[in-house]
Image (cartoon, rainbow, N blue to C red):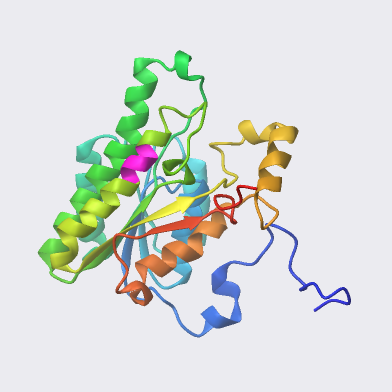
């Protein structure tokens, strides 16, 4: 504690990775597990992939082509990384991703469906093409990726963990996100229904709901100083999220610590959602 009775916390957004903290140095929560993370070249997916590797997992990722520089850097951070390019909106991409992962690592235990897009646009200006592509990537991509993973997990007969990256936008509206928020609500609903469908196979299905996390998806939107400061003011913890804030919750849901958690939604937003006054 400091002299003014406030805890000595690191600067906002500069906390160390979970795997660097003392509590996590003695136990790797995902030792021996094989994990797929979609959309992992940058942002939240990248942070989750790195932390899961730190926690002992063997990691395969999906990414959209053209990210070779980011993938080369990621391979330096994740030993033995399997990186497979592909358009996640296509069902065959999901099938190939799972098949190649199993061929390379022998099995599949966890999938994190993270790939997504978010273009800010006025409702009356959203084109049919933008609407369809957003739904195909965000919701269709999650559906087919988790379906392919579930088929493999059922075949193995060892259970597994499926995590869908939804959003706080599944719970609230957004004036320039009318094509986006329904897809995130859909992912939340999908995880609930998959939990019902797959529980008999001991496959757990849960949703992570990020709040405002600073990534390339909202970089332009948050460049507006007035809007950024408003969002920070709405957050009880006093800052916006960074990608690594999502890594710990994802590791928890993937690990045996969450062995009785399925059909759940975990909101990771610094308290923004509950701060209505």
**Residue 16 percent coordinates (x, y):** 64, 67
Return the residue nearer the eye: 145 or 253.
253
Q: Is residue 237 left or right of residue 78?
A: right
Q: Residue at x 44, y 34 (%)?
A: 117
The reply to whether residue 158 is in sight is yes
> Where is residue 72 shown, x and y percent of the image?
49, 49
Q: Is residue 34 magenta?
A: no
Number of numbered discs: 0
Residue nearest the observer in this picture, 209 or 18: 209
Residue at the (39%, 21%) spot, across then down: 130
Relative to the observer, which residue lies in front, 143 or 78? 143
Q: Is residue 228 left or right of residue 208?
A: right
Q: Please state the horizontal and vertical placement of residue 275, each as a whole percent of the image.
A: 61, 51
Q: Where does the magenta region start and end?
A: 183-187
Which residue is drawn at the image coordinates 49% and 61% (left, top)?
Answer: 247
Give the x, y percent position of residue 15: 66, 65
Residue at image coords 58%, 66%: 17
- Name the residue at the right extreme: 3
185 in magenta: yes
Which residue, as the protein is rendered here, is positioned at the far bottom? 26
**What secondary structure prevails in the magenta region?**
helix
Vertical position of residue 262 compared to residue 38: above or below: below
Depicted 165 relative to depicted 123: above or below: below
Closer to us: 115 or 105:
115
């Amino acid at each position: 504690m400091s002299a003014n009775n406030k805890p000595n916390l690191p600067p906002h957004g500069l906390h160390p990775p979970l795997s660097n903290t003392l509590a996590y140095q003695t136990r790797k929560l995902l030792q021996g597990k094989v994990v797929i993370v979609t959309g992992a070249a940058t942002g939240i997916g990248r942070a989750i992939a790195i932390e899961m590797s730190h926690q002992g997992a063997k990691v395969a990722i999906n990414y959209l082509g053209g990210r070779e520089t980011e993938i080369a850097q990621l391979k330096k951070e994740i030993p033995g990384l399997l990186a497979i390019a592909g358009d996640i909106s296509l069902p065959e991409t999901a099938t190939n991703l799972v098949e190649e992962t199993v061929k390379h690592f022998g099995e599949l235990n966890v999938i994190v469906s993270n790939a997504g897009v978010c273009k800010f646009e006025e409702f009356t200006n959203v084109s049919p093409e933008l609407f369809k592509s957003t739904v195909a990537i965000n919701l269709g991509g999650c559906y087919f990726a988790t379906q392919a993973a579930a088929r493999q997990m059922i075949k193995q007969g060892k259970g597994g963990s499926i995590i869908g990256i939804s959003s706080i936008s599944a719970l609230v509206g957004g004036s320039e996100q009318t094509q986006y928020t329904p897809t995130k609500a859909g992912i939340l609903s999908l995880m609930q229904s998959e939990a019902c469908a797959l529980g008999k196979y001991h496959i757990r299905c849960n949703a992570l709901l990020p709040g405002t996390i600073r990534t390339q998806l909202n970089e332009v939107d948050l460049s507006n100083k007035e809007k950024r400061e408003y969002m920070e003011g709405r957050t009880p913890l006093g800052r916006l999220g960074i990608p690594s804030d999502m890594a710990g919750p994802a590791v928890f849901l993937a690990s045996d610590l969450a062995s009785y958690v399925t059909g759940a939604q975990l909101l990771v937003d610094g308290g923004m959602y509950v701060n209505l006054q």
